[in-house]
Image: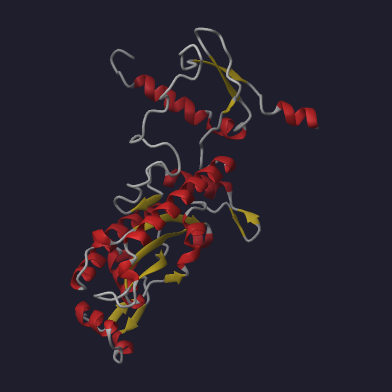
Amino acid sequence: MERTHPHSVWHHARAKGLREREERAVACGVDGLERSCSSCGEVAGRVVRLTCSHWRLCQPCRARRADRALARFHAGRELALERLRSRMHYRSRGGRWAEVFYTFTLPHVEFERDAREVVDAWARFRRLLGHYLEARGCSWREVPFFRALEVTSSTGGHWHLHVWSVLPYVPQWLLAHLWGASLSYDYQRLLPRRSAADLAHVFGRDADALAWLELEGNALLAPIVDIRRAEHAGAELAKYMVKDMERGELVSPLWYARAYQTLEGMRSHESSRKWLVARPHVGGWHPSLSPRATKPLCECGECLPSSKRKRGHFLEPLLEAG
C-alpha cells in the first residue's frame, strides 16, 4: 500500500496525531528533550521543554501563541504609524489619516455557514472600500490593517471580525453599508435598514460620501459595526479565537468541538502586505533569517544531533515539592 500510495505514511501519521491530540494537550510541558553530542557524548546543560502546540485545545500553548501574535501586532503597528506619520497630521493633504479599531458582525443563519460568510465578506468589503478610497485619492494598498476572527457561543454562535487599521476618515454609516453590501442575500435580508433621509443634513466628507454612494433606493444597510479606541486593539486582536467561558461558566463541550472543527484550516489572523518586512523575526524564527544552527553547539564541532525524550522531567520538581 505504501509503494502504491506514496502519501499513505503521511496520512497514517496524521491520523495518529489526531487520535493522540487530547493526550498530548493534557501532558503539555511535562516531558523534556535532552540533547547530546553523537561524537564526544557531551550532554547539553539545558533540557528543552516539549509542548503540544495545540493552540485551540491547550491553554498554555494558546497563551504562547497569543503572545507571539501580540508581539507581531505591536511591531507592525509601530512600523505602520512611522510610515504614515506625515499623513496623520491634521494639515495633511487630502485629509488626516487616523488609527481606528472596528468590529464587524453579521446575523446568525447557520454556524458553519456563518464562519465561511464572514471571511468571504471581508474580501468583498476590502474591494468596496478600496473603490471609495480611490475616489478620495488614495489606494487600499497604502492602508495597513490587522484583522482577527473570533466566535462566541451567544445566539448559537456569534462570528465577528476585529480589525485595526490606519485610513482616511470614512463615515461609520458608510462602513456599515459597505459591510452589509458585502454579505450575501440571505444575510442582507436579515439586516436592519436606515433611511437615507436621516443624512439629508450632512455636510463635508459625509456629503461627499453620500454623493459617491449614489443610492438606488432610499435605505442604507445598517449592520452592527462597533468602533473602539485603537489604543486597546492589541488585547482584542491577540486573544482567544473561541471563547471557552462566558458569564462565569464554561461553554458546552459539544459547541466547542463544533467550533474547533469549523475553524480547522481557516485563517485566524490576516494582515496587510509587508506587515513585518522590516522585522521578520518578531514573534519567532522566520525562514528569511539565517538557519537555526548557524554554529556548532559543542566544542568538538558537532551540533548535538542526538536527543533523548525524558518522560515527566518537568513534573518531578513539582512532585518533590508536594
The picture quadrant where one finds residue 197 is bottom left
Q: Is residue 109 left or right of residue 251?
A: left
Residue 117 screen position, x and y as percent: 34, 57
Quarter of the image that includes the C terminus: top right
The picture quadrant where one finds residue 164 is bottom left
Q: Is any part of residue 180 visible from this angle?
A: no
Residue furthest right in the image = 322
Residue placed most toward the observer, 162 or 231: 231
Residue 94 screen position, x and y as percent: 24, 75
Residue in view at x 57 percent, y 34 percent: 25
Q: Is residue 112 left or right of residue 184?
A: right
**Image height check: is 272 above or below 54?**
below
Count of numbered tags: 0
**Image height check: is 189 above or below 124?**
below
Residue 135 screen position, x and y as percent: 19, 72
Q: Is residue 266 left or right of residue 259?
A: left
Residue placed most toward the observer, 4 or 99: 99
Q: Is residue 53 left or right of residue 126?
A: right
Residue placed most toward the observer, 151 or 1: 151
Residue in view at x 45 percent, y 54 percent: 74
Residue in view at x 42 percent, y 55 percent: 148
